[in-house]
Image (cartoon, rainbow, N blue to C red):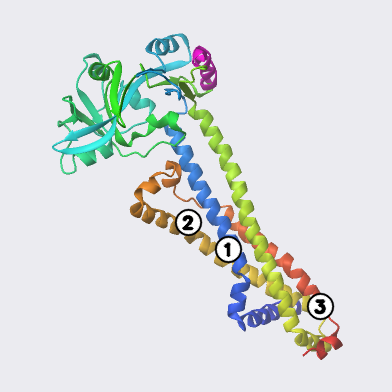
Amino acid sequence: MSYLKGWLLTIQLSIKCLLLHPMRSFLTVLGIQIGVAAVICLLALGEGISQEAQKQIAELGARNIIVRSIKPQKIDGILAEYGLTHTEFELIKETIPQIDSAVPIREIAFGFSYDAVDVDGRIVGSTPTYYETTNLEIDRGRFISGSDVAKHRDYCVVSHDVAKKLFPYQDPLGKSIRLKDRPDLFEVIGVLKQRGTSAGIGGSLAAEDFTKDVYIPFTTFNTRMGKEIFRSVGGSFGGEKVELHQATFKVSHIDDVMPAFELIKDSLRHHDEEQDISIVVPLELLEQAKNMRIMLMVVMAMIAGVSLFVGGIGIMNIMLATVTERTREIGVRRALGARQSAIIRQFLVETITLSVVGGLLGIVIGFITPNLILGIMQVCSNLFPEQMAALPPHIMNAKPQIVEASVPISFGVAVFVGTIFGVYPALRAAKMDPIEALRHE
């Protein structure tokens, strides 16, 4: 019982000593606060970014293999002819047994208008299977049907953003939108639910930015646009002949993804010299994202660990100064019979108290900071929309996710670091010669 009373008395005395100089005590634990908050905040931001990237990659379809036509950097002539052909698409679809479905895609950036309202976007020609392979969701109406493709109907399905801009106060269904500077009219038969841009994997996957798309039947696209598309861009006139801008192949089982990828790559190997296609496997990207998540967590934990280490050094420096300041007090206590263990216990309890308080304050700050950063980013998006739009979608759309393990681990490490760095000042205080300590002014 007396042993317990001794500890309680030590804790009470330590708290009183720390409260004598509240500002100094607060500044002493500032490093620990920053360290703990940094661990929780950085890991929360990293987890949020990682989860958003994985989500967007998964939306591309874990069982999909995407072949994308890319315009070569060096191409001569007014008409640029490159990319995947329809013959190659049919050959892959028919000869690779693992493929369950295949979606041909043609696209071009275009403007749309309705009642003097114009909006820039992209017209995409595809088939009904496109809806399933890209995990799109209908808000109103329906998507393109097989009958629409077979009969070359002038129907379209618009993305949420395009519908909102062209029809701010009307129901788009049944209305007809016009291609900018062209007589072509398309009746709106469906509106998609809101969806952000894709995971920003690179220019080869620009077609996965769904926010400005208008979808029409694949056959209608070919009829209206033709095989060769000529346009005036930046004062120069040129054209391109691309039979398929993209093809998405969906395999039957997730285990078939990599074997099918190898077969597709072999069948398109003759494009290696021209470098006019890119093959992307979302499953592979998903695995890379998971590995990057682990690396990101390790790096951020190391950065935050440095903050905790610096905080520990700060505690040691202040405690050494405190020992020097209280030298006479230590001499009086030793002269009255206090053992070295009591002096060590006194200063260690003060150090641990500082570490615990700093850790608790750091946890509070760590929970608040990620949401504060999110709010600042939203304000910046409103003030500087163009600059913020340049950031990758998985960063802009990320929502911080507190990593549960980061709270006890950061707190435990903070207390441990504080205790370790408090040992030397405590030993130095205990080993003072009582006579020399009493002479100290």
Q: Check the image and report above or below for 122 versus 259.
A: below
CA distance for labels 2 and 3: 43 Å
Q: Which residues are magenta?
A: 256-271
Q: Which mark is residue 430?
A: 3
The three-letter code of the residue at mark 3 reads Ala
10 Å neighbourhood of mark 3: few (<14), some, or many (≥20)? Answer: many
Q: Which residue is at a point 28% across and 34% down the rendered structure image?
A: 121
Q: Check the image and report above or below for 87 versus 185.
A: above
Whether residue 197 appears in this view of the structure is: yes
10 Å neighbourhood of mark 1: few (<14), some, or many (≥20)? Answer: many
For marks 2 and 3 on the same chain, the one whose residue lies earlier in the sequence: 2
* Dominant secondary-structure state across the stretch colored magenta: helix
**Residue closer to the observer: 221 or 424:** 221
Foreground mark, 1 or 3, reads: 1
Q: Which mark is residue 34?
A: 1
Outermost residue toward the left? Answer: 115
For marks 2 and 1 on the same chain, the one whose residue lies earlier in the sequence: 1
Foreground mark, 2 or 3, reads: 2
**Residue closer to the observer: 104 or 389:** 389
Q: Horizontal and vertical percent for residue 439?
A: 82, 90
**Residue closer to the observer: 338 or 91:** 91
10 Å neighbourhood of mark 2: few (<14), some, or many (≥20)? Answer: many
Query: Can you identify the residue that label 2 sits on?
Result: 370
Badge 1 marks a residue whose secondary structure is helix
Badge 3 marks a residue whose secondary structure is helix
Q: Quadrant of residue 316?
A: bottom right
Is 2 placed left or right of 65 in the picture? Answer: right
CA distance for labels 2 and 1: 14 Å
Q: Horizontal and vertical percent for residue 281?
A: 49, 26
Q: Which mark is residue 42?
A: none
Whether residue 409 appears in this view of the structure is: no
